[in-house]
Image: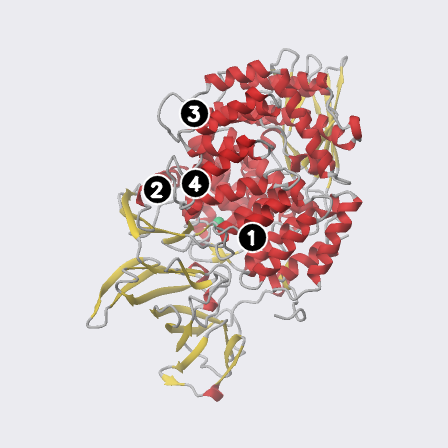
C-alpha cells in the first residue's frame, strides 16, 4: 500500500447508487486455496436518478476473475476494465439486466480476517464493513439491498455443516464426489455487509423459541466439538433477549431459524449477519470453571446486542457508513436497557458510565475525537469507536429521557413503520422521534455533529429569606480537531434537592407544578433555574443517572459530597459522589511531589468509613455495594488531571489511598469478606455474582495494606477458588506483587489451563496488566512464549492489547520501552491484519496529556511509525494522533 492518494471520504459527497441489485444468486464451492464463487446478479438502473451514466462499477479486492457474462453473453476482455479495487463495464443496458461473474479467492491466505477465511479449519466470513468485495464483485455499500439465495458446496468430511443467512431450502449429496451442498434463502432484502457463510465440522446445540405470535423458531449454536457443555448461558441469554425485545419494544423475530457460530479467530466481538450471527468464541463459551462473572456478563450483553440488531441494523439499515451510530448507538442502548431491566437494575448505569468515561471521554478529548456521526474518514474500519457505540447509545438514552419511555417507544415504532426494509440516516431516526412526540429536536441534532465532551458547570445559591434556590448552569463544548467553534447543546439535566435530614425536597420552578422527574433542559450557554418554596438550605444532586454525557463541575464542598455519598436517593449519583470524593484526594496527591504525593490518613479514613458503611448496608444489592469498594482507576485519575500526567505519581497516589483505606476499615472489610463467602455451588444469578464481586473488592483493599496475613488470604482465595471468577480475581490481585505467592499462582494457573485457549488468554492478560517495574520485559518474554501466536487476535489482544490499554504505568514507563514495544508489534501485525494493528495503535491517543518527558518519548515513536510503510488503517491513526495540537 502507498502513503499517497489516501483521500478522506466525505459525508457531503454521498450520491445514491446508479444501479440497484434486486436479487443475488451465489454458488460457492468451498476450497482451502481456491474457493470458486459464481454470482448471478439481477440489476436495474436506480429509478430515482435521471438516466445518465450507463457505466457500471463493482467493488472487488484480491479476487481472481474467471468470467463475466451480461444477459447470458460472455463478455470479452475489451468489454470491461479491471483494476485493483474495481471491475467496471463501460456500457450496460438502460433496463433491468443480469450479470454473471465467476471469481476465485484464497480463504487460507486471508490473514486480514475480512471476507472469506478459515479459522481452525472452519470456513467463515466477515463482511462488515467492506468484506463482501473480497468474496465477489459487487456494489458493496449498505444502501444496495438484495434478496440472497446461496448454494454452498464443500467436502462432506471436512465441512459437514454448511450455513448461510435465512432459511434452509434444500440440501443433498453430489454423487460420487465426496461433496455435498446446502441452499439457503433469505427473504429479507439486505445489504452485502450482512451476508454470511460458514462451512465446517462443528457440533451443534439446539433449542427453540416460540414468538409472541406463536411461531416456533429453531435456535442453534455451533461450536467446536467438545465445547457443547459451554453453550447453555449463551442460549439462555438469547432466549431472554428474544422475549425482552417483544415485551419492551414489540419486536419479534422473523425467520424460522436463528443460528450462532463461534469461531476462535475473529477481529471483533461478534457480527449480526441476518439469521446467522458469527461470534468470537470468547463471547459464546462459558462454564463456571472456565469463565468469570465478567465473561458471563459480556456474553449476555453481546448475544443480546447482536440479536437486537435484527431490527435495529438489519430490517432498518444504514444508508452509508457515516450513519454507523444509527445501528450501533441504538443497539448498544437497547442491550444496556436489557441488562438493566432483567439483571442489574441501577448497577448497570454505573457499569455503562464507567466504560464510557474510560474509553470515550479520552477519545473525545484527544486527537482522534470525532462526532458520533463522523463527517469524513479515510478508513471506515477505524470508526468502530467508543464514540460511535457508547456515546451513540448515550444519545438514544437522552432522547428517551427527554421524550419519556413511552414517547421514545412511540418514536421507535414510527421509525420501524416508516423505514422497514430501507437504508436510512440519523435524520430519519430523529425525525421519527420528533414526529411521534411533536417535539422540535433540531438542537438535539448537534449531539450527532459536534465532537467533544460538553463541560457543564453548576452552582447553587440559597436565599434564606426568599426560600429560593438558584441553580446557575453554564456549558462549553471544547474545540476538537477540525471543529473550533461549537454551538450550545440541548442537555437533559436531572436534578434533585436534598434536605438536611436526607429527604427529597419538592422541585417547583415558576408555577406550582412540580418538576416532573427532576428534569431540566439546558439549551443555552448560560442559564439560571430558580426553585421556589425551598424550606431549608438544600444539597443539590446534579446530573442524576448521568442524564447526559458531559463533564460536570459543581460548587459542592467536601462535606456536601460526603453527604451525597451517604444519602443521595439516586443510586448513580450516590456512587458518583464516592468516586468524586476519592478523585479529589487522588488528583491532589498525584499533583504533589515526594511526600506530598500522599493522601493524608485522616482524609482516607473518612472516605474509608463512608465506603465501608455503604458496602456493609445489607439493604443494598451486593453488586452495587461492590462498586463502592472499587477505587477510581489510574486512567480515571489521569483523565481527571487532564495534563502533565506522571503515571508513576498516579500509581503511587492510588496505592497510598488503597492502603490507607484498607488499614482504616480492615476489620470491617475482613467481616464483609467472610460474610460474602459462597454458600453453595456456582450460580450466575446477579445476587451471587454481586457477592463474589463484593468479596473480591474487599480482598483487593485488604491486600493493599501489605500485611502478610492479607497476602496469605489472597493466596488462599486463589487456592480454594471453586470457579473462574474467584480464581482470576485472586490471580489479578497477586499479579502486581513481588512475592513467591504470585509466582506459585501463575504457575499453577498455567499448568491447569495451558490447553484451554480462552482461559490461557487470561493468564497472558493478567501478567500484561500487572503494574510492575519489569512489565515491559515480562511482555517481551511472553511474546516468545510457545503458546503465544500473532495469528490469533484474541491472544494478541490479551497480551499486547492488555498491556497498551490496561497497564498505564507499564505502557507509559519513563524510558519509553512500552511505546517501542507496542510500535514494533503493531508494525508486524499491520502486515497481515491492518484492522487489528490500527486498533492497538489507538493506545497512543492520550499521549498529549502526559508530562513533557513521556510526551517526547511517545512523539519520537509515533514519528518513527509515520515514516514507515503502513496500511491505510494504521496510517490514519498514526497521522491523526500526531497531527492534532
Ligand atoms: Zn453492533
Label 1 crowd bin: few (<14), some (14–19), many (20+), radius 10 Å: some
**Could you tell me which secondary element the residue under label 1 belongs to?**
loop
In the rendered structure, are the residues bearing label 4 and label 2 in contact, judged by CB atoms less than 8 Å apart? no
- Label located before the other in sequence (2 or 3): 2
Q: Earlier in the sequence, mark 1 or mark 4?
A: 1
Q: 694 or 572: nearer the eye?
A: 694
Crowd band around label 4 with a 10 angstrom C-alpha radius: few (<14), some (14–19), many (20+): few
Quarter holding residue 180: bottom left
**Residue sitting nearer the eye, 5 or 870:** 870
Reading the image, the residue beneath label 1 is: 384
Residue 143, image x, y percentages: 49, 62
Please identify, in this view, whether the residue under mark 1 or under mark 4 is nearer the observer: 4
Residue density around tag 2, few if under 14, some if 14–19, many if 20 or more, within 10 Å: some
Q: CA distance from mark 1 to mark 4?
A: 37 Å
The label on residue 751 is: 4
Q: Position of residue 49 (x, y in %)?
A: 52, 71
Which residue was labeled with disc 3? 687
- Tell me whether circle 4 and circle 3 mark residues in contact (CB < 8 Å): no
Amino acid at each position: 500500500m502507498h502513503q499517497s492518494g489516501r483521500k478522506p471520504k466525505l459525508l457531503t459527497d454521498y450520491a445514491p447508487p446508479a444501479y440497484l441489485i434486486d436479487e443475488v444468486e451465489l454458488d460457492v464451492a468451498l476450497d482451502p486455496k481456491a474457493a470458486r464463487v459464481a454470482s448471478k446478479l439481477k440489476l436495474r438502473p436506480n429509478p430515482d436518478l435521471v438516466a445518465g451514466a450507463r457505466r457500471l462499477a463493482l467493488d472487488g479486492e484480491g479476487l481472481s476473475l474467471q468470467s463475466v457474462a451480461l444477459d447470458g453473453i460472455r463478455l470479452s476482455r475489451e468489454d470491461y476494465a479491471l483494476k485493483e479495487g474495481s471491475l467496471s463495464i463501460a456500457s450496460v443496458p438502460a433496463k433491468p439486466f443480469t450479470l454473471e461473474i465467476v471469481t476465485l479467492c484464497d480463504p487460507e491466505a486471508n490473514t486480514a480476517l475480512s471476507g472469506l477465511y478459515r479459522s481452525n479449519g472452519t470456513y467463515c466470513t466477515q463482511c462488515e464493513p467492506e468484506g463482501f468485495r473480497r468474496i465477489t464483485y459487487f456494489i458493496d455499500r449498505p444502501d444496495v439491498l438484495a434478496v440472497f439465495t446461496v448454494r454452498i458446496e464443500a467436502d462432506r468430511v471436512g465441512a459437514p455443516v454448511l450455513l448461510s443467512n435465512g432459511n434452509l431450502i434444500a440440501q443433498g449429496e453430489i454423487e460420487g464426489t465426496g461433496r455435498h451442498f446446502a441452499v439457503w434463502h433469505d427473504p429479507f432484502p439486505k445489504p452485502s455487509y450482512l451476508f454470511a457463510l460458514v462451512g465446517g465440522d462443528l457440533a451443534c446445540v439446539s433449542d427453540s423459541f416460540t414468538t409472541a405470535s406463536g411461531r416456533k423458531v429453531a435456535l442453534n449454536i455451533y461450536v467446536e466439538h467438545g465445547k457443547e457443555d459451554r453453550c447453555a448461558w449463551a442460549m439462555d441469554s438469547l432466549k431472554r433477549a428474544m422475549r425482552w425485545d417483544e415485551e419492551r419494544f414489540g419486536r419479534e423475530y422473523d425467520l424460522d431459524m436463528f443460528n450462532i457460530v463461534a469461531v476462535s479467530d475473529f477481529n471483533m466481538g461478534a457480527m449480526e449477519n441476518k439469521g446467522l450471527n458469527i461470534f468470537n468464541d470468547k463471547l459464546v463459551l462459558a462454564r463456571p470453571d472456565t469463565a468469570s462473572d465478567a465473561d458471563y456478563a459480556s456474553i449476555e450483553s453481546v448475544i443480546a446486542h447482536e440479536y437486537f440488531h435484527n431490527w435495529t441494523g438489519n430490517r432498518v439499515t444504514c444508508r452509508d457508513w457515516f450513519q454507523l451510530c444509527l445501528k450501533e448507538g441504538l443497539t448498544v442502548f437497547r442491550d444496556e436497557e436489557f441488562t438493566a431491566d432483567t439483571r442489574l437494575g441501577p448497577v448497570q448505569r454505573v457499569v455503562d458510565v464507567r466504560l464510557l468515561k474510560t474509553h470515550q471521554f479520552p477519545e473525545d478529548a484527544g486527537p482522534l475525537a470525532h462526532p458520533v456521526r463522523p463527517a469524513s474518514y479515510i478508513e471506515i474500519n477505524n470508526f468502530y469507536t467508543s464514540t460511535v457505540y457508547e456515546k451513540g447509545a448515550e444519545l438514544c438514552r437522552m432522547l428517551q429521557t427527554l421524550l419519556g419511555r413511552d414517547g421514545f417507544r412511540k418514536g421507535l415504532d414510527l421509525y420501524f413503520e416508516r423505514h422497514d426494509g430501507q437504508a436510512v440516516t440519523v435524520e430519519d431516526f430523529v425525525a421519527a422521534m420528533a414526529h411521534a412526540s411533536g417535539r422540535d429536536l433540531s438542537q438535539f441534532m448537534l449531539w450527532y455533529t459536534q465532537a467533544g465532551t460538553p463541560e457543564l458547570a453548576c452552582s447553587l445559591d440559597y436565599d434564606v429569606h426568599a426560600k429560593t434556590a438558584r441553580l446557575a448552569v453554564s456549558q462549553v463544548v471544547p474545540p476538537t480537531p477540525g471543529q473550533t467553534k461549537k454551538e450550545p447543546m440541548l442537555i437533559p439535566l436531572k436534578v434533585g434537592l436534598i434536605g438536611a435530614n436526607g429527604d427529597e425536597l419538592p422541585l417547583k420552578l415558576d408555577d406550582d407544578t412540580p418538576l416532573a422527574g427532576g428534569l431540566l433542559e439546558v439549551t443555552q450557554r448560560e442559564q439560571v433555574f430558580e426553585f421556589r418554596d425551598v424550606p431549608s438550605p438544600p444539597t443539590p444532586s446534579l446530573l442524576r443517572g448521568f442524564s447526559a454525557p458531559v463533564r460536570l463541575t459543581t460548587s459542592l464542598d467536601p462535606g456536601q459530597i460526603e453527604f451525597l455519598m451517604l444519602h443521595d436517593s439516586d443510586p448513580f449519583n450516590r456512587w458518583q459522589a464516592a468516586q468524586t470524593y476519592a478523585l479529589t484526594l487522588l488528583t491532589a496527591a498525584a499533583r504533589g511531589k515526594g511526600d506530598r504525593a500522599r493522601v493524608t490518613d485522616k482524609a482516607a479514613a473518612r472516605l474509608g468509613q463512608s465506603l465501608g458503611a455503604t458496602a456493609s448496608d445489607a439493604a443494598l444489592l451486593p453488586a452495587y455495594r461492590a462498586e463502592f469498594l472499587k477505587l477510581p482507576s489510574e486512567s480515571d485519575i489521569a483523565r481527571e488531571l487532564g495534563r502533565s500526567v506522571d503515571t508513576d505519581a498516579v500509581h503511587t497516589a492510588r496505592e497510598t489511598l488503597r492502603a490507607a483505606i484498607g488499614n482504616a476499615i480492615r476489620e470491617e472489610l475482613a467481616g464483609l469478606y467472610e460474610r460474602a463467602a459462597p454458600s453453595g455451588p456456582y450460580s450466575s444469578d446477579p445476587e451471587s455474582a454481586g457477592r463474589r464481586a463484593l468479596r473480591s473488592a474487599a480482598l483487593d483493599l485488604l491486600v493493599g495494606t501489605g500485611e502478610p496475613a492479607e497476602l496469605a488470604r489472597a493466596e488462599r482465595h486463589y487456592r480454594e477458588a471453586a470457579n473462574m471468577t474467584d480464581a482470576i480475581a485472586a490471580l489479578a490481585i497477586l499479579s502486581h506483587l513481588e512475592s513467591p505467592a504470585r509466582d506459585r499462582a501463575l504457575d499453577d494457573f498455567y499448568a491447569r489451563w495451558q490447553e484451554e485457549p480462552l482461559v490461557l488468554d487470561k493468564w497472558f492478560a493478567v501478567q500484561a496488566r500487572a503494574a510492575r517495574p519489569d512489565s515491559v520485559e515480562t511482555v517481551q518474554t511472553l511474546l516468545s512464549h510457545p503458546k503465544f501466536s500473532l495469528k490469533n487476535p484474541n491472544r494478541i489482544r490479551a497480551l499486547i492489547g492488555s498491556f497498551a490499554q490496561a497497564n498505564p504505568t507499564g505502557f507509559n514507563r519513563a524510558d519509553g520501552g512500552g511505546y517501542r514495544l507496542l510500535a514494533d508489534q503493531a508494525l508486524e501485525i499491520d502486515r497481515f491484519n491492518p484492522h487489528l494493528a490500527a486498533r492497538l495503535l489507538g493506545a497512543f491517543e492520550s499521549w498529549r496529556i502526559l508530562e513533557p518527558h513521556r510526551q517526547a518519548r511517545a512523539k519520537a515513536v509515533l514519528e518513527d511509525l509515520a515514516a514507515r510503510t503502513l496500511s491505510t488503517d494504521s496510517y490514519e491513526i498514526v497521522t491523526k494522533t500526531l497531527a492534532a495540537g
